[in-house]
């Protein structure tokens, strides 16, 4: 180290010779380069200052941290200088590349446990040092764990690191939302009380899973889903069944890190003593195990880039030029995350509740959707969770951390579950946002199904996993803060309007075979599609519209438990049950039937009233007063229940009376105010 420190790295571009590109970030390109005077291979990270969205403070912080840190497991900067509109950061060349790149090229299923243990131990040593210095890394992930040819491990990328001793503005930045969603700790997402170095421990746990599976949990989902799932699902973990190849101690380590309450997470120092690290080996072991036989970094990077470009090309039709950048970043999985909290809250409010989902890591995605992804991109590995949830239930794992939706979302002023109830009227016109950007980066369920042609499904799925199975997209700051466009659609479950809905798939298939294939992709959104495309069909297939809620219709299709061919009046629901696809003539006769039944029931009621009146000595003037009299007939109670009801009725009548009085008072007050206002206007 002393030897390195003594070296003087030149601070002008002419003294370096750039070779091939070996990495790319959101605003930086990393090159292998030659430091001419020292005849030494280095890496140069060229940050395009024009692309940095004025985040010069962030850049300064990154370079400063890189300059100041002095630990064998931290990537340090030799020097930095500006050239043109670029800032060049000169650093040691890590010929092995990042763990993410290694997994993408050759270990798509993740690494073996001893390799993971070694990588994690070295990373943890870096964290122990950083935390002791008062730094929070905030972006711990496989993409930022770099290896040199000898298998030495260095944690890189201090772009979003923060200092815990910061004050003022910088301290406030610690209450901001930075990092990459899949790796982000719940408390960082919540922004409730700020966060500390324990946020790195959570990311460390996620990184452990990433190294084990080849991708981070939830990595196939758009950012909003990741946020919501992290907040409301049980913490992800290694599954005892599915992850049989991993030891108990590894599972324990992950579970220890992925505890939602940061206070219950261990410090980096304590974690380093975990018995899992007894499995860790030497750097040479890592080099032999995973670097041996790999192509040179530049070549690997070129191949990966070409593959990604290819996939982007396949999707080209989907993206406007403006959105291209964000999509590229999505696929590359860079970490330019900087959220606009207000947007997040609105988005969170629109996301479907996952409670009913059986597949914890794959909520809202039907099996058919998964199949469709598979069919269109057979060469791409579907994440294992598609078949088997990655989330191990708290009970199964013996974790104490059961998800508590209400409390975890307490920091969102709009609670998603409540907001869902108000979703009916949310449409693109009403929201007023016009930017389509979010649609590419955070595709909501409703939108997914809006574009439900098999072709589109395939493309969409690819965007989330096929093209980039291990990572999730990032939103460039400028895109993330743009007003978002919401797509109208019922985000509540299909049967939410009608709790009595019991029409089975078979019934529906008979009634509406035409929609069979569409229906396979989740209910409510399917309905929305049809609403927009084929109202008349929808009307007959879903039943008569009995109520309009904004742009959505509440239908009575499902009130009949058996979907009987005849309509009838259901006195309990008070609803009209009408079968679908019924000819007009039979509908008419059904309606006449109902009317007849209605009249008969009415007559029955009048008879009853008269009978009660007779027995209580009270007279009924007309059938129209029936309702009142039904209440009054209880004036001669002959049972306790009747007395109770009577008391309730009296109470109700009293409150109605006082409400009427109050209304009148308010009216008078209003009139008085109006008069005063008029008088004032006249004076003026
Ligand atoms: N010193 C290095 N030697 C070899 N490769 C490197 C080096 N530094 C970075 N890279 C490669 O370049 C990629 C991008 O670098 P870096 O993460 O620093 O950029 P960034 O703009 O901060 O990206 P992000 O925000 O996505 O993390 C890394 O993922 C890694 O693969």
Image (cartoon, rainbow, N blue to C red):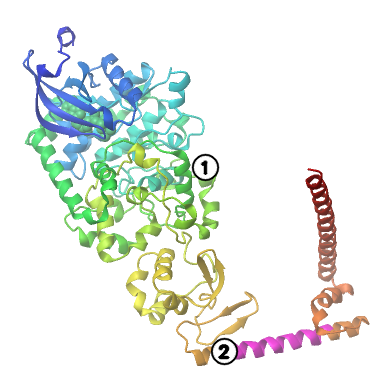
Q: For the C terminus, which image quadrant?
A: top right
42 or 552: nearer the viewer: 552
The image shows residue 119, relative to residue 163, as above or below, that is: below
User: Does 591 appear in magenta?
Assistant: yes
Q: Is residue 526 left or right of residue 108?
A: right
The image shows residue 487, relative to residue 532, as above or below, that is: above
Q: Position of residue 455 (x, y in %)?
A: 25, 63
Q: Residues within 10 Å of mark 2 (few under 14, many from 20)?
A: some
Q: For the N terminus, which image quadrant?
A: top left
Residue 364 visible in rendering: no
Q: Is residue 670 left or right of residue 296?
A: right
625 or 399: nearer the viewer: 625
- Magenta range is 590-609
Label 1 sits on residue: 412
Residue drawn at (50%, 80%), measured in percent from left and top?
A: 562
The image shows residue 520, relative to residue 468, as above or below, that is: below
Q: Which label number is shown at residue 590? A: 2
Assign a secondary structure to mark 2.
helix
Q: Position of residue 319 (x, y in %)?
A: 26, 52
> Residue 513 lies in what quarter of the image?
bottom left
Q: Residues within 10 Å of mark 1 (few under 14, many from 20)?
A: many
């Amino acid at each position: 180290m002393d030897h390195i420190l003594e070296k003087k790295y030149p601070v002008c571009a002419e003294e370096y010779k750039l070779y091939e590109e070996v990495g790319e970030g959101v605003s930086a390109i990393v090159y292998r380069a030659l430091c001419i005077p020292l005849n030494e291979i280095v890496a140069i990270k060229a940050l395009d200052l024009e692309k940095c969205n004025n985040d010069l403070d962030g850049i300064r912080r990154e370079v400063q941290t890189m300059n100041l840190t002095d630990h064998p497991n931290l990537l340090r900067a030799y020097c930095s200088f500006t050239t043109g509109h670029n800032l060049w950061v000169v650093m040691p060349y890590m010929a092995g590349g990042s763990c993410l790149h290694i997994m993408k090229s050759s270990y798509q299923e993740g690494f073996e446990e001893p390799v993971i243990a070694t990588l994690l131990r070295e990373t943890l040593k870096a964290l122990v040092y950083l935390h002791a210095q008062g730094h929070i890394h905030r972006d711990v992930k496989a993409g930022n764990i770099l290896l040199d040819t000898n298998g030495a491990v260095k944690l890189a990328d201090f772009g979003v690191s923060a200092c815990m001793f910061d004050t003022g503005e910088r301290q406030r930045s610690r209450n901001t939302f930075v990092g990459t969603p899949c790796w982000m700790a719940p408390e960082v997402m919540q922004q409730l009380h700020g966060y500390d170095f324990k946020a790195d421990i959570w990311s460390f746990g996620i990184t452990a899973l990433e190294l084990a599976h080849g991708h981070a949990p939830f990595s196939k989902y758009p950012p909003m889903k990741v946020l919501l799932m992290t907040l409301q699902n049980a913490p992800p973990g290694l599954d005892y069944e599915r992850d049989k190849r991993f030891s108990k101690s590894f599972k324990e380590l992950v579970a220890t890190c992925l505890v939602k309450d940061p206070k219950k997470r261990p410090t980096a120092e304590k974690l380093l003593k975990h018995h899992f690290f007894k499995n860790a080996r030497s750097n040479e072991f890592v080099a032999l195990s995973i670097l041996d036989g790999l192509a040179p970094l530049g070549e690997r990077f070129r191949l990966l880039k070409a593959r990604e470009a290819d996939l982007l090309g396949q999707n080209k039709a989907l993206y406007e030029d403006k959105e291209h950048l964000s999509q590229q970043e999505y696929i590359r999985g860079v970490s330019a995350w900087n959220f606009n909290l207000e947007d997040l809250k609105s988005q969170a409010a629109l996301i479907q509740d996952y409670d009913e989902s059986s597949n914890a890591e794959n909520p809202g995605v039907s099996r058919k959707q998964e199949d469709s992804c598979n069919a269109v991109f057979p060469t791409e590995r579907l994440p294992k969770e598609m078949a088997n949830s990655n989330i191990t239930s708290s009970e199964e794992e013996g974790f104490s951390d059961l998800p508590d939706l209400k409390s975890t979302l307490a920091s969102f002023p709009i609670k998603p579950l409540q907001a869902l109830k108000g979703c009916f009227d949310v449409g693109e016109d009403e929201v007023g946002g016009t930017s389509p950007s979010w649609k590419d980066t955070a595709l909501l369920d409703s939108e997914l199904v809006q574009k439900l042609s098999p072709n589109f499904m395939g493309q969409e799925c690819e965007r989330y996993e096929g093209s980039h199975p291990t990572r999730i997209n990032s939103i460039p700051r400028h895109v993330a803060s743009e007003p978002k466009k919401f797509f109208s659609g019922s985000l509540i479950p299909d049967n939410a309007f009608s709790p009595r809905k019991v029409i089975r798939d078979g019934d529906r298939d008979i009634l509406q075979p035409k929609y069979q294939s569409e229906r396979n992709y989740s209910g409510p959104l399917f309905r929305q599609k049809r609403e927009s495309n084929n109202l008349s069909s929808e009307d007959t297939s879903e039943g008569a519209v009995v109520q309009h809620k904004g742009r959505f219709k509440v239908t009575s299709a499902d009130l009949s438990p058996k979907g009987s061919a005849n309509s009838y009046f259901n006195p309990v629901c008070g609803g009209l049950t009408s079968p679908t696809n019924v000819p007009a003539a039979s509908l008419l006769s059904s309606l006449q039937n109902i009317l007849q039944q209605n009249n008969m029931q009415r007559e029955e009621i009048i008879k009853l009233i008269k009978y009660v009146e007779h027995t209580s000595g009270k007279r009924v003037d007309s059938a129209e007063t029936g309702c009142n009299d039904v209440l009054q007939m209880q004036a001669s109670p002959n049972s306790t229940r009747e007395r109770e009801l009577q008391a309730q009725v009296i109470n109700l009548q009293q409150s109605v009376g006082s409400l009427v009085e109050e209304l009148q008072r308010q009216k008078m007050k209003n009139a008085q105010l109006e008069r005063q206002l008029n008088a004032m206007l006249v004076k003026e």
